[in-house]
Every structure is written in C-alpha cells, then in structure tokens.
Image: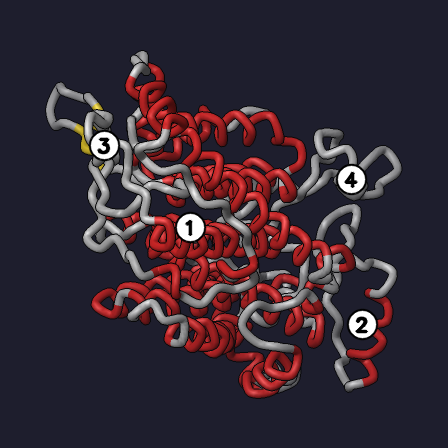
Amino acid sequence: MKIKSIIIVRICLLVVISIGLGCDKTIEIEELQPYTPTNTDANAGTWATYLTAPADLTVPAPTDITSTEYLQELAEVKSIQPNESQLQAVKYWGVGGVLRWNEIACELAAAYNIPPNYDENGNYPIPDPANPLKNPRFPFANPPYTSRALALLTIAQYDALVAVHHYKVQFARQAPYSVANGTIPRLPQSTLPSYPSEDAVIAAASREVLKFLFPGEVPLLTEKSEEHKNSRLWAGMNVKSDITAGEAIGKVVADKIIAYAKADGMKDANNQPGYAAQIADAKARGITRIWTSREIPARPPMLPAYGNVKTWNFGMNEKIEMRTAVGAPPAFDSAAFQKDVDELKSIASDRTREQVRIASFWADGAGTYTPPGHWNRRTIQITYSNKYSEVRTARTLALLNSAMHDAGVCCWDMKFYYLVPRPSEINSAITTSTGIPNFPAYASGHSTFSAAGAEVLSYIFPEKKSEFEAMAVEAAVSRIYGGIHYRFDSENGLKHGKMIGAYAVTRGKKDNSGL
C-alpha cells in the first residue's frame, strides 16, 4: 500500500489554494517553505518529559571539529552534489520533521480507517497484527486507535527532542556550516549545535513507533526515514556522526514508548466475550434499554473495553470522578429525553443546507483520519504559521494528543457504562446523514475529543481561544445535525472533554517550557 498519492491530494489541508476567475481555471498551490524558528528553545533539554529523560540515555561524546575523523566527515558532506529529487527532499523535510511525520501518520490512519466487512458466514473477522496486509488489514484505525497512535507518536518525538537538546548543549559541537571551511547550507541556518541531529532523532523515533502501529507499512516508513536523514547530508546541515547519534537516541526512546504501548491495555480493548458482563452490570445498575448494533448482520461493538486503556495525564480514580461529575443521561421516560428526541425528529424531517454542510465537514468517518486527525491538521497549520521550533511543535502535539487519547478512553468508558441506544434505535423517524457508528451514543466522541483538544490549544494559543471553542461546539452540534447523537450527548461530551483537557494543561504548566 502506497500513501504518497494520498498525501499529495490531501496536502490542500496545509496549503493555500486559489482558483483564478473567468476563463483561467489554474489552481495555484503555495508550497510550505522552510523557515528559521522564532525561538530555538535552546533550553528545551531541561523540559519535563513523559517516559524518557535525557539522563536515561548514554550518548557518546562527539569527535572534535579539528579531528581527522570529523574533517573526513565534513569533506564527504561538502562533496555531495544533490540531484533535483534530493533537493526536493531537502525542501520537503526542511519544513519540519515533526510536521511531516504527523502528516504521514494521519494519512496512514485514513488509509487504514476501514471497518472489516463480514464474511460468507455473516461473521466479522478481526484484523491480525501478525498478518497486517491480509484482509481485513491491521489495524482498523478507528477514532480510539488513531487518538492513541497520534499520542504515542508525538510523545516519542517530544521526549526524543528534549534529549537531543540536552546533549546539544552538553557537547556544543558546531554545525558543519559554522566551522572554518565548512559547508554551504541549503536550508536556513540554526544557532543550535548540530550534534546530535534533531532530524535524525525525529526520523528514527517516528519510524519505529509507526512500524509498531502500522506493521504492514514497514518498507514505506523505512524509505521515508532514510530520505529524511539523508536530506540533512544533502542540505549540508549535518555530518554523518550527527545523524548516527540522533538515530540511536530516537531508537531508544521509541523502544520505551513501544514497551509502554504493549502494556497499556490496548490488547484487551476488543474484549468481545467480556461485553456480556458489561451489559449485565449496566442492567444491575437499573439501565433498562441497551444499545444494539444497527448493522446487518449485527456487528460486534467497537472496542467495548477501550475505556480500560491507560491514560497519560491522570489515573483510574480521576477517570471515575469525571464520569460521575458529568453524570448520567436523562431517563428514557423523562421530558428532557423526549425533548432531545423531538429535536432530532424535526431536524431529520427538514435538514438545512448549513446543517448538512456542518455534519459532512465533521463526519470524519471511514477513510478519514478521524476527529483526532482533524485537530492535528489544524494544530500543525498554526505551529507552522507561528514558526515554532521542532521541540515546541512536538510539545504542542504531545499535549494535544495525550489529551485526545485520554478523551477517547474516558468517552468509551462512559459509552459502555451507560450503553445508551442511538436516536434512530429509539425512534425510526430519526434518519441520519452520516451513517450510524457501531457503539453506544452517550456521550459524543466528537464532542469529547474536540473539547479536550480545544482546552489544550486555548492554553497554548490563547489569542485563538474563541476559534478553538467554536470549532469544538461545531463538531459537537454536527453530530446532532447528522442525527446520530442527542443534544445531551454532545453537551455532556463537551463538558467531559474540557475536564480531560484541563489535566493536560496542568502538565504543560509544570513542564518548564516557559508557557
């Protein structure tokens, strides 16, 4: 499976497209350009990490810039005459390795966000990680899987970059374009030391984590990683030993992230045999109407035990406290419940063009990079326009994605605690415009993901708080317009997500990043 063509098509999410008027129908694309960061964040080696601190690593001291070994490396880089394809790679990766690997991860999520179809016996086979390219392909990158994947990726990038900054300051080896008779750089120069290489550490950490998450894409990810690292040599920005040291750091950090992921509870998230016990527990708590699959043949629920997966920014007790604070949905025989059902019946009978547009824009269903990917795309647009350093971009995405991962876990915990039927199951007059998700209604995943993301981004970019909050509200009401959520699903999802995001904000305020 190749994603290069998908990336080219979807790059419009990060570029400005203008179509000429009159007879001129030319589409002009403003390409992203490499930039000098507004702030290099030279002290980032002191920032708090998630799993791997710089002290956990052993990084050898580099050779001196006057040594025979270094001078030979420098001569090798100076002798490179990159061809046109290599120069394009220099520019592509020069925009930012964190940004580019985030793009790749989102496109992989979209390509793998395909629910398995039923077989000739009416059963739904489970994707097999040992045979990832066999139908159905592994993974099924649904919203919970994608939120977890983006969190693992961006936390690995962040921890690795903090370590790189620590050792850059410790060893303080000049970049090859800064030494006497050095290289002529083909990208904006940095005042940071070049050992270890930021790009090499991003390439290695990203490659290893994504190989673990998308095992059918090992050749593609290896190819991208090699191109990323080599682009620094072609650009005259690093010598080989810079790259080697960065590669080693990235691999160690990724290994620690992968070990964490193997033990975070995800392997038991699709515990279908245990679903009967969840239903029995709900009935014992007085829940009288239980969600059932609307698909024919009935599909097993999506990840019924995902609510037990480990969270990043708080523990089990806080998860339960927030579920309790948000509270139960209205009783089925209550006036509040009937009011929301009546609203959905009214919308279904006469959807406006604007309601259809909003429902479609935020649908984020099969074949898309899901709501978490939607928020990642907007975030990297903003970090790029603000000319963030690599490490600050990684920090922003790590905070965002850890919050949205936690939101997914808490939301699925809520869904399979209350097991509320979808609106169309309650009243057949409620038709949908975006299909019916195969899991309970309460509370809305879009709302919970979006409110958590908006809370984090409002902290990092306070001048855009109104924009983020408006995005979250629109994402929430889009599910009402689509006919797949009651208003109480969306409103309580927003409330829940805001609480969840606040824990990530608390982490950010204590990480020594100066924000």
Tell me which corner region of the image, top left, top right, bottom left or bottom right, holds residue 406: bottom right
Q: Is residue 9 left or right of residue 118?
A: left
Q: Nearer the viewer, mark 3 or mark 4?
A: 3
Disc 4 residue type? Answer: Asp
| Nearest-to-viewer mark from 1 and 4 | 1
Q: Which residue is mark 4?
A: 128
Helix, strand or loop status at disc 3? loop
Residue 387 in the image: above or below residue 26: below
Q: CA distance from mark 2 to mark 4?
A: 25 Å
Q: Looking at the picture, which amino acid does disc 2 mark?
A: Gln
Which residue lies at the image location 42% right of the left edge and 41% below the top edge?
Answer: 62
Q: Identify the residue under disc 3.
A: 177
Q: CA distance from mark 2 to mark 1?
A: 46 Å
Provide the residue designation for mark 2.
Answer: 278
The residue nearer to you, when weighing 385 against 58, is: 58
Sort mark 2 into few (<14), some (14-19) or many (20+) by Cα contacts within 10 Å: some
How far apart, in angstroms, are the residues tagged by discs 1 and 3?
A: 19 Å
Q: Which residue is mark 1?
A: 164
Q: Is residue 57 left or right of residue 511?
A: right
The amino acid at mark 1 is Val
Instruction: State the residue in front, 200 or 11.
Output: 200
